[in-house]
Image (cartoon, rainbow, N blue to C red):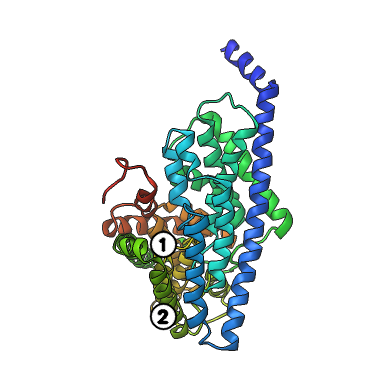
Amino acid sequence: MLKHIKHSGKWLLSHKDWRAHFTFIVGATVVGLVATFMAISSEWANHLFIATTAISPYLPFIISPLGLMLVVWLTRKYFSGSEGSGIPQVMVALELGHEKERSLLLTLRIAFGKVLLCILGLLSGASIGREGPTVHVGAAIMFSMRRFVRFRMYDMERVLILTGGAAGVAAAFNTPLAGIVFGIEELSRSFEVRTRGLMLSGVMVAAITAIAIQGNYSYFGFTSALIQIQDAVIPVIVCGIVGGVFGGIFSLLLIKGSRIVAPYRNNRPFVVAALCGLGIAIIGFYSGQLTYGSGYIEATQLVTASGDLGNQYGYLKLIATVVSYLSGIPGGIFAPSLATGAGIGAHIADWLTAYPQGVLILFAMVAYFSGVVQAPITAFVIVMEMTDQHELIVPMMASALLAAGVSRSICTTPIYSTLADSFRPDGQKQHQ
């Protein structure tokens, strides 16, 4: 025991190991800075596209198809590997055991393309989020830091990837705890105890960097909605089941749709992009320009009770997100899923008029998001931190767990694990 303590002390004082810790801090700081840039630029892109719809609601019928065609062309020509949300690529990189294989999925070129193309996608009105791409970018940045120091710990490349992905979530949502939980629950099922401190440090540094620039804000604002535990049973059951059903349906549509569209996307990528862009414009026009972009503005209005978007918003946002993802452009589903859940919650509030609307919106948001990603702990922790609502942690947890169970009965394989198949080497693919 004494020898172990002595050895640990030497490890802490080792010059090389302090360089390793410094490398983690520098990398996490860069992740925080890039995440902040993505947040600011994505918000700008959202507002700019909405401004074009104010000029004419018919402009998206031109901008969206052409914009998505441009994004697809740039992706295929210069940034292959940046498609989709980026989380499947990070998961595959964690599974692979060789640096050369990981390097194909996590390069600074792909990270740069992810940032650029995500912004262009939002400028085209696509229903995508920046949070999933931030996970990919964060993992690529941290993975690149391996060049600056030789690590003594086993499989530190994997720890770098895991830390970068978790730090990306923390910085993107301003939710440090959710970043840690996401790293454990979604990206990696297990890792050595000694790596936990490194991941924790990376997540906290990235979050602090983002907060220092943007301020300590709540992602979707604040809500005063409360309910007693004994009164939350029916809302939890209803929101959990409804959110789980629609979350499972969304996942199934994305998985099955990707398999059906893949051959056409390979042979006629620009035709598929144009048709998806046209679909986005049609849905956006029918929704009254509400389904364009990440859904951040609309979700904030629902959570803070500062706007009425109508009963159809959540379902139209779901369809718009599916269409956007099937186009093959880089972009995430986190923010659009949270906005969809909020819209479904607002509709549920019209049925359950005896309960606070804000509570139902939060429960449905957690439930739908949990149903999509089938990671219930990550779901309720993210929403809890984003809305600064700690009093409802128990019913939100129950909603998330129920929704995840319901979703699994509809979509038996988690969405990210299944979508990761297209990035896995032959012979390592999973089948539903």
What's the amino acid at mark 2? Gln
Among the two numbered marks 2 and 1 on one chain, the one whose residue lies closer to the N terminus: 2
Are there few (<14), some (14-19), or many (20+) residues within 10 Å of tag 1? Answer: many
- At which x and y percent is residue 294? 53, 68
Give the tally of numbered discs: 2
- Secondary element under disc 1, as helix, strand or loop, is helix
Residue 203, visible in the rendered structure: yes
Question: Which disc, if any, is residue 367?
Answer: 1
The image position of residue 100, as x and y in percent, is: 47, 36
Q: Quadrant of residue 173?
A: bottom right
Q: Quadrant of the N terminus?
A: top right
Residue closest to the eye, 137 or 310: 137
Q: Is residue 392 above or below residue 49?
A: above
In the image, is residue 268 above or below residue 181? below
Which dot marks residue 312? 2
Q: Give the residue displayed 73% in from the left and 54% down from the top.
A: 212
